[in-house]
């Protein structure tokens, strides 16, 4: 099979030496590792399709990979399987300014899309914090978000068409640059499918006109609950900010040490950005300011210049990495709760933190209730990493009890596959499995991700529960 | 199996005698008259009805308000219409979260009334907005002028519950605005015309009713000037929540929303860029938008159903051509200029399909008189359609749900 793969690719595009394949053993979630037998570096849709056909014929599992920045183990290889790395497919294929469309290969980075259209006053809205390195292919797989998706939507709202190499090695065109493609919205289910329904090799993106004005304020509160209340009131008042971000004391202090954004000393810091036409922006900013004051903000600063705004963002963007300064190890959790439940959920997280004796920092997309608790631990202390993981899992339980989700943007991947039954009934998971088999009947396309299997998770309670209709003798399972 | 052979006894055992009745001509799905109409009141009853129908080889079509049962191609078979009207009511509405969860048979008007009390709305204004149910709107992907800014059901559905033909109850998404856990199965169901599952509950993103809203009308303009006026508005520093060009009358309606200050500034800009423009009173604006919806899709009057209704989409750079072609080939049309989309009525609109395809676009005949109904979908054969068939086969292997109503006879 390796010889056939080599024949389908460019001369230097098949890696098999242990030292060459080792760097692909994990993605951004380094706790899970598996060494693939081969790493393929195709340059075209045709090469990807040829490789998939060869894997399919040989019955070998394969995993597509972009920059490997994912945080849920979605690009974790199958041991002894094949990694199809799209990092060499980095061309921007076309820019259509009149129709605000850009066609790119999957290895193009998120930031490069905006770079390609900036000269025309356009930009690509989804902005995951890894945007300088993460690729569009990975964004499509994960339905990536970012700070600005509160107003402008997620990847799924900006991908209008994609070329999909199916699990049978055929090339399918999903969606189109024009709205309302006839037929089922296959693209809608492929975006966010974490590479389990095929491999996307070309993507058509919608780009937006740069807003006329961007305004920003920061508000300091003496408690996270007061800040969370302000967030709820802003949204309920009808203001739809471009972004609403929150940092608690621990993450703010870490960020200050790292980049000196000059944030005020406080328990909770709120960053609110608005964009749009001038009059609307200024009115919204004024309203946000009043709401923050009424909610008990102890200090409010409005960015007067683009530089001040950039500095406010720099502290926020640096927060994850800066945690390394205050803790030798940390686990990034990703959960979602309804906005109105933020105060009680943050309180619940604080209680868990106290009972485990582990610090938890909170820096997150408050506007859409997407939490990123950073669970701090010392890898050198016996058993602490395990307790941190357990605490992170308990946080998801708190999110679910509040009516939320186990992941808002990092994906299920390998990491949370066994947590899926906490959120979905056994029947709902079998339906998803039926969708998966429609696309990938052989089960070779990124297996072991997204859905729980007995092999991964042991016997999962509920996964193969008998449906009441079956129990009543009204139906047999197909 | 002939329609007359279907006994209602089993269905009556599930939902009760009062909620099974013999079908009449008015229950037809794309012209095919079923034999029974069954009205389950719970998701469990939906599951039981579907399981019975699958087991007995009966074909089922789901029906909400019944306003779009003529959409799509005629089904190959239809024995039972499953009415969702008893699956009604709002399950949950947390105003602070701008999210509501409603049962599929809830009329859109009821949802708007309930959330309207809290100064909120579902930003969907599809045709037949009074009788149409949430489940039907999602299953047809129906839209109105607000699509300009708020998109369609695709942009507003956060999650849903549904029942497959074999009675399996599935769900996807949730009731939070951001969520990437599991496959977004709801995307497959939106616009699927009930061919994959029966939707039982939908979780929706709401928007606050803006404090200020104005509609500016410009025109009537000569046909040749409509596109230029539209382009001037699209290029201007305004963010319309709805913008339509009405044909053949040659008027353009633009609605802006937001704060008083923001709306006033936008109205001023519109006054300077849009020719022959005038701000409408609130009452005039309400009437104008209702007129636009009827012009696009036809009213609730049955006589409107005689006309074919299509949606046409082309790259928006071809707006001038779109407006010109619709001016001659359609009897009436509503164009969303910023998106390059139109809803059009008329006897010749099937001819637009080839034209749209030549520009990289497409046309779908949503509703058609009997002689055209088989042309609802374009003829396509490519790997994407193979995947669509595989999805149908996997979720509804016995072809129980409205077989033949969707693209490619799916």
Image (cartoon, grey):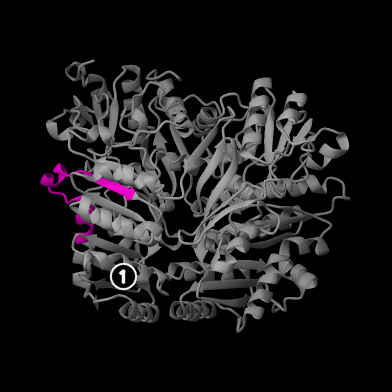
| Picture coordinates of residue A23, whole percent (x, y) | 82, 42
Pointer 1: residues within 10 angstroms few (<14), some, or many (20+)?
Answer: many
Chain of the residue that carries numbered disc 1 in the rendered image: B
Say whether residue B307 is magenta: yes
Quadrant the C terminus of chain A occupies = top left
Determine the image quadrant of residue B378: top left
User: In this orientation, which residue lies closer to the viewer: A72 or A404?
Assistant: A72
Label 1: state its secondary structure. helix
The single residue placed furthest to the left in the displayed view is B303
Q: Which residue is mark 1?
A: B229
| Picture coordinates of residue A421, whole percent (x, y) | 57, 36
Residue B318 appears in the rendering = yes
User: In this orientation, which residue lies closer to the viewer: A431 or B111?
Assistant: A431
Quadrant the N terminus of chain A occupies = top right
Looking at the image, residue B348 sits to the left or right of residue A95; the answer is left
Against B95, residue A271 (above or below) is: below
Say whether residue A217 is magenta: no
Residue B83 appears in the rendering = no
Against B141, residue B207 (above or below) is: below
> What span is in magenta?
B291-312
Against A211, residue A464 (above or below) is: above
The single residue placed furthest to the bottom in the displayed view is A304
| Picture coordinates of residue A359, whole percent (x, y) | 75, 59
Looking at the image, residue B39 sits to the left or right of residue A220; the answer is left
Marker count (numbered): 1
| Picture coordinates of residue A108, whole percent (x, y) | 65, 52
């Amino acid at each position: 099979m390796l010889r056939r793969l080599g024949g389908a690719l460019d001369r230097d595009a098949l890696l098999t030496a242990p030292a060459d394949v080792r760097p692909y053993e994990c993605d951004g979630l380094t706790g899970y590792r598996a060494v693939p037998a081969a790493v393929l570096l195709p340059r075209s849709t045709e090469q990807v399709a040829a490789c998939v056909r060869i894997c399919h014929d040989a019955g070998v599992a394969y995993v597509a990979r972009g920059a490997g920045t994912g945080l849920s183990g979605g690009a974790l290889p199958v041991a002894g399987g094949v990694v199809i790395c799209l990092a060499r497919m980095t061309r921007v294929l076309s820019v259509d300014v009149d129709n605000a469309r850009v066609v790119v290969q999957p290895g193009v980075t998120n930031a490069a899309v905006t770079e390609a259209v900036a000269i025309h006053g356009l930009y690509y809205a989804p902005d995951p914090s890894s945007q300088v390195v993460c690729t569009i292919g990975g964004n499509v797989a994960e339905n990536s978000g970012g700070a600005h998706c509160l107003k402008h939507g997620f990847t799924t709202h900006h991908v209008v068409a994609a070329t999909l190499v199916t699990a049978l090695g055929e090339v399918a065109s999903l969606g189109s640059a024009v709205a309302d493609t006839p037929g089922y919205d296959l693209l809608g289910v492929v975006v966010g499918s974490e590479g389990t329904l095929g491999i996307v090799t070309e993507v058509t993106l919608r780009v937006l006109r740069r807003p006329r004005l961007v305004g920003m304020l920061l508000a300091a509160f003496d408690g996270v609950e007061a800040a969370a209340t302000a967030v709820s009131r802003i949204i309920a008042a009808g203001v739809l900010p471009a972004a609403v971000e929150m940092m608690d004391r621990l993450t703010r202090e870490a960020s200050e040490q790292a980049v000196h954004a000059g944030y005020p000393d406080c328990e909770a810091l709120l960053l609110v950005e608005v964009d749009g036409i001038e009059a609307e922006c200024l009115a919204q900013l004024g309203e946000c300011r009043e709401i923050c004051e009424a909610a008990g903000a102890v200090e409010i600063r409005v960015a007067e210049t683009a530089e001040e705004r950039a500095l406010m963002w720099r502290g926020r963007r640096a927060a994850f990495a800066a945690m390394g300064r205050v803790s030798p190890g940390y686990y990034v959790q990703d959960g979602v709760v309804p906005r109105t439940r933020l105060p009680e959920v943050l309180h619940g997280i604080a209680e868990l933190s106290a009972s485990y004796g582990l610090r938890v920092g909170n820096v997150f997309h408050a506007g859409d209730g997407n939490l990123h608790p950073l669970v701090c631990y010392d890898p050198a202390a016996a058993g602490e990493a395990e307790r941190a993981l357990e605490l992170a899992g308990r946080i998801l339980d708190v999110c679910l009890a509040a009516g939320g989700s186990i992941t808002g943007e990092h994906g299920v991947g390998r990491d949370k596959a066994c947590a899926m039954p906490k959120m979905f009934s056994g029947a709902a998971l079998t339906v998803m499995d039926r969708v998966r088999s429609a696309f990938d009947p052989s089960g070779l396309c990124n297996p072991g991700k997204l859905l729980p299997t007995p092999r991964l998770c042991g016997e999962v309670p509920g996964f193969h529960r008998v449906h009441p209709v079956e129990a009543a003798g009204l139906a047999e399972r197909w | 199996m002939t329609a007359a052979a279907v006994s209602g006894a089993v269905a009556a055992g599930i939902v009760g005698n009062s909620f099974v009745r013999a079908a009449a001509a008015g229950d037809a799905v794309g012209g095919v008259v079923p034999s029974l109409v069954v009205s389950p009141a719970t998701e469990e009853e939906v599951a039981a009805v579907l399981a019975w129908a699958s087991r007995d080889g009966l074909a089922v079509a789901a029906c909400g308000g019944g306003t779009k049962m003529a959409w799509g191609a005629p089904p190959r078979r239809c024995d039972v219409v499953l009415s969702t009207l008893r699956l009604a009511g709002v399950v949950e509405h947390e105003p602070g979260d701008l999210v509501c969860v409603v049962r599929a048979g809830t009329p859109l008007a009821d949802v708007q009334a309930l959330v309207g009390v809290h100064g909120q709305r579902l930003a969907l204004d599809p045709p037949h907005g009074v009788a149409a149910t949430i489940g039907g709107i999602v299953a047809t992907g129906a839209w109105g002028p607000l699509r300009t800014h708020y998109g369609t059901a695709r942009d507003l559905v956060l999650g849903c519950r549904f029942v497959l033909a074999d009675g399996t109850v599935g769900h996807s998404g949730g009731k939070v605005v951001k969520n990437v856990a599991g496959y977004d199965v709801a995307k497959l169901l939106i616009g699927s015309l009930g061919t994959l599952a029966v939707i039982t509950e939908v979780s929706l993103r709401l928007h606050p009713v803006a404090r200020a809203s104005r509609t500016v009308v410009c025109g009537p303009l000569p046909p040749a000037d409509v596109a230029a006026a539209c382009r001037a508005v699209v290029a201007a520093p305004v963010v319309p929540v709805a913008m339509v060009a009405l044909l053949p009358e040659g008027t353009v309606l633009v609605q802006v929303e937001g704060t008083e200050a923001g709306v006033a500034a936008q109205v001023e800009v519109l006054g300077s860029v849009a020719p022959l423009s005038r701000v409408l009173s609130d009452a005039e604006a309400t009437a104008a938008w209702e007129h636009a919806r009827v012009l696009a899709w036809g009213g609730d009057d049955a006589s409107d159903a005689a006309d074919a209704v299509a949606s046409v989409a082309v790259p928006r750079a071809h707006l001038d051509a779109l407006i010109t072609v619709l001016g001659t080939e359609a009897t009436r049309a509503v164009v969303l200029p910023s998106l390059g989309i139109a809803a059009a009525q008329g006897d010749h609109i099937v001819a637009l399909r080839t034209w749209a395809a030549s520009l990289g676009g497409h046309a779908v005949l949503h509703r058609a008189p009997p002689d055209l109904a088989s042309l609802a979908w374009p003829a396509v054969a490519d790997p994407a359609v193979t995947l669509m068939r595989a999805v149908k086969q996997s979720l509804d292997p016995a072809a129980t749900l409205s077989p033949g109503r969707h693209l490619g006879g799916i």
